[in-house]
Image (spheres, grey):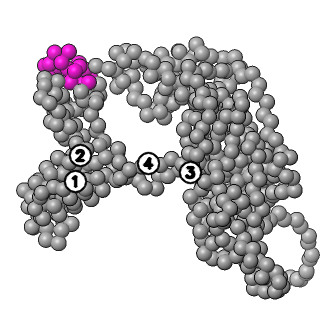
Amino acid sequence: MKQTLNLKTSQQLTLSLQLQQAIRLLQLSSLELNEEIERALEDNPLLEKDTDNAENAFETPLDLPDVSGTSDASSSEETGSAETYDTSDTLNDFEVSVPLDKEDFVLTSDEGGIEAVDEEYTFQYAAGTSLREHLLSQLALTPADDSTRIVTEALIDELDDNGYLTTPFEAFRKYFSSPKMLTRKRFNDALHLLQDFDPIGVGARTPSECLSLQLRALPDSSAQRTALTIVERHLSLLAAHDLTKLKKATRIREELLRDACALIRRLNPKPGRAFDNDRTSAIIPDIIVHKQGHRWIAQLNDAAVPKIRINTIYAEMLSAKNAASSMWSGRVQEARWLVRSIQQRFETILRVSQAIVERQQRFFDHGAVAMRPMVLKDIAALLGLHESTVSRVTTQKYMLTPQGTVELKYFFGSHVATSSGGAASSTAIRALIKKIIEGEPPAAPLSDQQITELLDKEGIILARRTVAKYREALSIPPAHQRKDF
């Protein structure tokens, strides 16, 4: 077999290191971005935090307009061509303009929009102490012997986020170095001590015991005694909303039964949920929406923009020593790439966010019932971006609105046909279903079929099973479980 040597030319698209870094930073959340920057500050001495001038955090100031604007950034799918960023245009040269055509499907709300948002509000989080800290503070003030105190503290450590004790006695006693020393009596004494703490119901082992502890703390009455009987013996019938079987099982007149059920509904079956059991729940919105005149506009949240820059003193020293031939030339380039990539990240986020705000003006005034149908492709086509870029921008990026702090992906959803030939947002339909159920008569809740018929009168074409799917997504039980006694 004869060997030959052939030359062949071909073209191949590749991603530069700078572009790879920009794409990676774009898909990070604010918390992940801060962690990435901290690592870069430790690794590269040319980078530093800008603590002197917070408004000029970048080497090149991030001069973004209030309404819209960015450099012309575009990207393409990872599986094919490369993503490119054209930074030749200034931010002020771009203005998002989205025509708000008359829609075939319009929903209104009785609630008016909020005129302004407090711009000093930078993030939301679950404040307060944890359940464990709250219980240990009470234990410290309790005149109990050392053995009971040790066992009670161990029980507190075994509570789940709802405040329940799910570890049985035999498994619990194995945690001690001398399991035989933990008698059943000492365990019960510690458990009763814990169950006397605030919030009432903590330390319960079952929902029945939790509700029973709360009822026993209430003043004695006919309704209280009846409620105790229900939660201790017939809780399953109450959960199933089976009033007929419950009346038959308890042999209690209907009026007293209703009072007892109303008393039970005022109890808290998950007392531990009121506390800050998750310290990682902080959400820092990247975008703040506020009203300017008659329009809602998007603006970057200063608290979410990292304060980072290149140390000018080090940069000048390296330049004076011909840094191009030194080992530090790579570090200088890395620092410049990082600063520029962060700048491009926030430019792109603002650009996409303002396009979303322009299309969803009614949402900010009236809430979810006024959400317009929109998919990633709509924003991508409008801004000249690829859908993959819009997907990265809207993942784990949050917007502070008059309706609360929501993820950017919240504004995108599937389309549902209307009788007039238009389309409605699935998010708006879910909100409308929730509103219909909230307004239903408590004694005669609406079935999924009845909700389907009401939506049909509004011009929304949905199958009954689709209504059931949306209802379940809203964590709303079926009609027979919503029936008020």
Mark 1 is surrounded, within 10 Å at the Cα level, by few (under 14), some (14 to 19) or many (20 or more) other residues, namely: few
Q: Secondary structure at mark 2?
A: loop
Q: Secondary structure at mark 4?
A: loop
Q: Amino acid at mark 4?
A: Ala
Instruction: Identify which residue is drawn at 28% across, 29% down.
Output: 265
- Prevailing secondary structure class for the magenta stretch in the rendered image: helix
Distance from disc 2 to disc 4, alpha carbons, whole Å, reads 19 Å
CA gap, disc 3 and disc 2: 32 Å
Give the residue at x 73% y 43%: 66
Q: Which residue is mark 3?
A: 284
Task: Report how far apart the C-alphas of labels 4 and 1 lie in the structure.
Answer: 22 Å
Q: Amino acid at mark 1?
A: Gln
Kindly identify the residue that appears in the image at 57 percent across and 65 percent down: 35
Q: Residues within 10 Å of mark 2 (few under 14, many from 20)?
A: some
Mark found first going from the N terminus, 3 or 2: 2
Mark 4 vs mark 3, CA separation in Å:
12 Å
Q: Earlier in the sequence, mark 4 or mark 3?
A: 4
- Residue located beneath label 1 in the image: 138
The residue carrying mark 4 is: 126
| Residue at screen point 20% across, 15% down | 255
Which contiguous range is marked in magenta?
A: 242-262
Q: Mark 2 — residue?
A: 198
Residue 176 screen position, x and y as percent? 18, 68
Q: What amino acid type is highlighted by mark number 2?
A: Asp
Residue 313, relative to residue 128: is it above or below?
below
N-terminal of the pair, mark 2 or mark 4, is: 4
